[in-house]
Amino acid sequence: MKKIAAENYNLPLTLLQSKGNTSVVPLNWEKHVLYLLDQRLLPHEETWLSYRSAKDVAQAIKDMVVRGAPAIGITAAFGMVLAAYGLKHKNRDLFVEKWLEKAAFMLQARPTAVNLKWAVERLEKLARRHYELSPGDLTAILEKEAISIWTEDVRANIAIGFHGQALLPETGGVLTHCNAGGLATGGYGTALGVIRAALSRGKKINVIADETRPWLQGARLTAWELIKDGIAVTLVVDGAAGFLMQKGQIKAVVVGADRIAANGDVANKIGTYTVAELARANNIPFYVAAPVSTIDPFTPSGDQIPIEKRGPGEITTFAGKKIAATGVEVQNPVFDITSHHLITAIITELGVLTPPYGPAIYACFS
Amino acid sequence: MKKIAAENYNLPLTLLQSKGNTSVVPLNWEKHVLYLLDQRLLPHEETWLSYRSAKDVAQAIKDMVVRGAPAIGITAAFGMVLAAYGLKHKNRDLFVEKWLEKAAFMLQARPTAVNLKWAVERLEKLARRHYELSPGDLTAILEKEAISIWTEDVRANIAIGFHGQALLPETGGVLTHCNAGGLATGGYGTALGVIRAALSRGKKINVIADETRPWLQGARLTAWELIKDGIAVTLVVDGAAGFLMQKGQIKAVVVGADRIAANGDVANKIGTYTVAELARANNIPFYVAAPVSTIDPFTPSGDQIPIEKRGPGEITTFAGKKIAATGVEVQNPVFDITSHHLITAIITELGVLTPPYGPAIYACFS
């Protein structure tokens, strides 16, 4: 994985350009090579890494070179295309067998976001359906499908923005948690897509970003991509969101999602549940913006969503420097569950879902 | 202010020792010199700084060499003793006039914690009462009073611990936010005093500490002083406290206070209000532990408590390294107000106050 200059590969998607939208994108694809913007180094360095194998892509997802549920799904899809390119087997049966093994490995990269599973399973189904094709032809079909997954995600985000912007106030603060922006998706973003759409329609909202410990997605990624887009953003520590709500400085909250259960419970970055509880206590609407690919109709409620726990180093150290006292124990769950009771609406590309979420979600898959 | 070895001056208070308690203390006093443990450098370095003037002490409070409402009060008191020592005036009127000017300056160091005001005004009253004394005799009385303020605080904390431990569960997690420990007081601590007392009575509680952004008092100070005392502690990011509550891992919350209004509203470290709201939503008792010196009966409610805002650097940089994207705006309120509605009980040295807090607080001053 050699480091390459950002300018060479961070070409905005034609789709975004054609709509007059700007947004960073977290990945790029050229035949046989996937490029990922290393989000661990942002905002200090824009470094693009190149990947030529599914195994390395899975590791990149695990290591959070790329993060954000939709972006992980798209990345995994291209990883599976690289898997197909990498298989030397001329024998069709052996090719599919080996490719499915690599798919199973990819599925293990991260547990909470359902989009990874969704994207890989979509390619699996395609591979099974076209079992009769030669490895070369099947690879071409898989590549086409991965590009579709990416393009559809950008289209979905633009639709989410369109539906969601109507819900935001004309003026006042809009709070977001973590990064559900261009960097977390194929481009444009879900929660930040709603904010971009509201601003482009002339709404005078102020974006407020939780810094989002431990990984500081708000301070590092949301702030960076909005400022790059010319959008002003105010940063607060996670503990200050409630204070701003009490002071009337926040009129709405909009966040992304890593997985939405069949009853509308939402898994999202740790701290999201807290923001939702604060919003309820302060009578502020709490919106979740996510594509339908983030909805997992086979998981009945949030209780069944696996919550990833990461290592203590994310909390006890920063940039290699020790922060915390030696000998302290750590719990580092990186997602939490927000009950559907706390969610005012779920904004999807198909439209705005409102309670009761069960039937609304069912309808998305009918 | 030369750096001196910690061992020379961090002598545990006789009072603490005599009760068999251990706890770090944030300050020490020898005639003409105040020593402060530099809390900005903890847990990495134990550096004691020495102070010989009120002006330098005020700056140390402002710069957070020492923090925590009771510790600030005690420090300010010794600062005012240094002020008295520093005044060369043999003329009594001029001495008192200049000393009161320095008191007015000291009062400006930090706005939210009322203990600073309380301690300085206590010395002011004493000075006015003994106006007839010579500067030398008055200085001696002020020094004796400052030592009393310190000693009384330690006694108060031990009493708070005694009253408060009865409220904690026999087993399970107890969450604290920020540092209301030995480092924040004269020794032993308020919230951590309650925890120390519960543990010393054999309760099997697990201490859980919010890291407490931006200053990381939980990760740096609470974890450090508890581990130093042989008490295990689990660190979580501020956004994870709600997750642990949902999972039943937290049975009680206990925090300190920077100022308690006459109606029981509590100003405390930013993020405290959030913890209180989460506790209410999860049916977990939320306790505030503070000496009566933290109660401000002249402030009717939390709305009238001034909230200090500090610079953006506390959020955008860490240990000199930039964290956040360039160009981001910042709001950094460092305290918030928790409404008395969210507080199960206020634990003072005089006993446990329960709602309605107005009459209970009035009784403390009767």
Image (spheres, coloured by chain):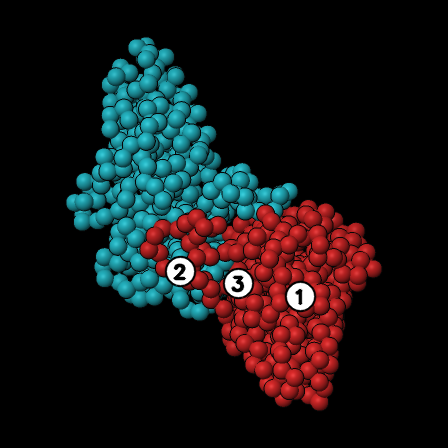
Chain colours: A red, B cyan
Q: Residue at x 39, y 48 (%)?
A: B220
Q: Quadrant of the N terminus of chain B?
A: top left
Three-letter amino acid code at disc 1? Val
Residue of label 1: A33
Quarter in which the C terminus of chain B is drawn: top left
Disc 2 from disc 1: Cα separation: 38 Å
Real-space Cα separation, disc 2 to disc 3, in angstroms: 19 Å
Residue B120 in sight here: no
The location of residue A161, given as percent across then percent down, is 74, 62
Mark closest to the chain's N terminus, 2 or 3: 3
Q: What residue would you read off at disc 2? A: A330
Q: For residue A55, which quarter of the picture? A: bottom right
Q: What secondary structure is marked by label 2?
A: strand
Residue closest to the eye, B245 or A222: A222
Give the labeled residue for mark 3. Answer: A63
Q: Chain of mark 2?
A: A
* Residue with the most extreme top position: B91
Q: Earlier in the sequence, mark 2 or mark 1?
A: 1
Tag 2 and tag 1 share a subunit: yes
Callout 1: few (<14), some (14-19), or many (20+) C-alpha neighbours within 10 Å? some
Describe residue A162's horizontal placement relative to residue B24 as left or right. right
Residue at 37%, 25% (x, y): give it: B54
The numbered mark, 3 or 1, whose residue comes first in the sequence reads 1
Residue A279, quarter of the rendered image: bottom right
